[in-house]
């Protein structure tokens, strides 16, 4: 994605909180660093959700999300508009979490916390399973924890956060075909775990 033209993208008549991500980034890069808070407000909860999905620890969510946005702040002057700000921040958050996992040598699994916000699993052949039943939700949470990270992460980004295949590939730094393959395999593995319980 090429850097957007300056003409018309920064409109002084539009309040900063209503401006597009690109407009705010261009203002930031031109020296108006105070607009960074609007970007933080837009994406703070999304970043917190993905961190919680990895660590399932509220204390770590606060610390790591702060570190993520500090890194975003320092890297933003070099943002080249080659991807959306949304996927760029997600990639930074995911990589930061992986760094933390490697440093601490922990092997924690993702929780299914964010799935509470959706009305069905969006997983093949499980579209009619809702989360109205706390027991079913708990079973799905525990089942997802059993998946290897490379299959679990695409499910979280696609079925929980609603990202496109291109966005997921950008976040995970892999090909779209790899995303589709891992998502399909992950859904199959999850279905195999759940079927004996849900039938």
Image: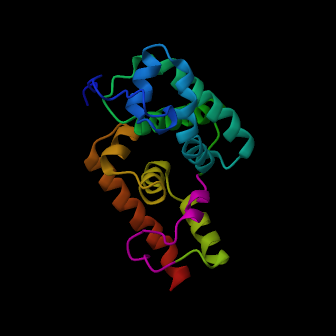
Residue 140 in picture, x, y percent from top left: 57, 69
The residue lying toward the viewer, choosing from 11 and 73, is 11
Residue 115: name its quadrant: bottom right
Q: Residue furthest bottom?
A: 199
Residue at coordinates 43% horizontally, 65% vertically from top-left? Answer: 189
Residue 50 in picture, x, y percent from top left: 55, 46
Q: Looking at the image, is 27 positioned above or below residue 125?
A: above
Question: How is colour applied across the structure in the image?
Answer: rainbow
Q: Looking at the image, is 129 positioned above or below residue 159?
A: below
- Residue 108 visible in the picture: no
Residue 141 in picture, x, y percent from top left: 60, 64
Give the left or right position of residue 55, taking residue 10 as reference: right
Q: Looking at the image, is 43 positioned above or below residue 35?
A: below
Q: Residue furthest front?
A: 13
Q: Looking at the image, is 126 positioned above or below residue 103?
A: below
The residue lying toward the viewer, choosing from 81 and 174, is 81
Quarter of the image where the N terminus is located: top left
How many numbered callouts?
A: 0
Residue at coordinates 61% horizontally, 78% vertically from top-left? Answer: 132
Q: Residue furthest right?
A: 59
Residue 72 in picture, x, y percent from top left: 52, 26
- Residue 123 in magenta stretch: yes
The residue lying toward the viewer, choosing from 42 and 170, is 42
Q: Main secondary structure of the magenta part?
A: loop
Residue 69: name its quadrant: top right
The residue lying toward the viewer, choosing from 1 and 124, is 1
Q: Residue furthest top?
A: 31
- Residue 172 visible in the picture: yes
- Residue 55 in magenta stretch: no
Residue at coordinates 49% horizontally, 34% vertically from top-left? Answer: 15
Point out the stretch of residues depicted in magenta. 110-129
């Amino acid at each position: 994605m090429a850097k957007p033209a300056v003409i018309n993208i920064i409109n002084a008549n539009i309040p900063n909180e209503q401006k597009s991500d690109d407009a705010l980034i261009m203002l930031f890069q031109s020296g108006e660093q105070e607009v960074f808070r609007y970007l933080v407000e837009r994406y703070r909860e999304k970043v917190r959700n993905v961190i919680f999905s990895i660590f399932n620890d509220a204390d770590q969510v606060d610390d790591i999300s702060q570190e993520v946005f500090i890194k975003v702040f320092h890297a933003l002057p070099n943002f080249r508009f080659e991807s959306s700000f949304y996927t760029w921040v997600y990639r930074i958050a995911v990589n930061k979490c992986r760094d933390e996992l490697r440093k601490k040598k922990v092997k924690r699994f993702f929780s299914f916390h964010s799935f509470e916000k959706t009305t069905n699993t969006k997983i093949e052949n499980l579209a009619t399973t809702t989360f109205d039943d706390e027991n079913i939700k708990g079973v799905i949470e525990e089942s997802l924890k059993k998946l290897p990270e490379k299959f679990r992460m695409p499910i979280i980004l696609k079925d929980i956060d609603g990202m496109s295949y291109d966005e997921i590939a950008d976040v995970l730094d892999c090909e779209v075909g790899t995303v589709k393959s891992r998502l399909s395999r992950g859904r199959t593995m999850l279905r195999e775990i759940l079927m004996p319980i849900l039938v």
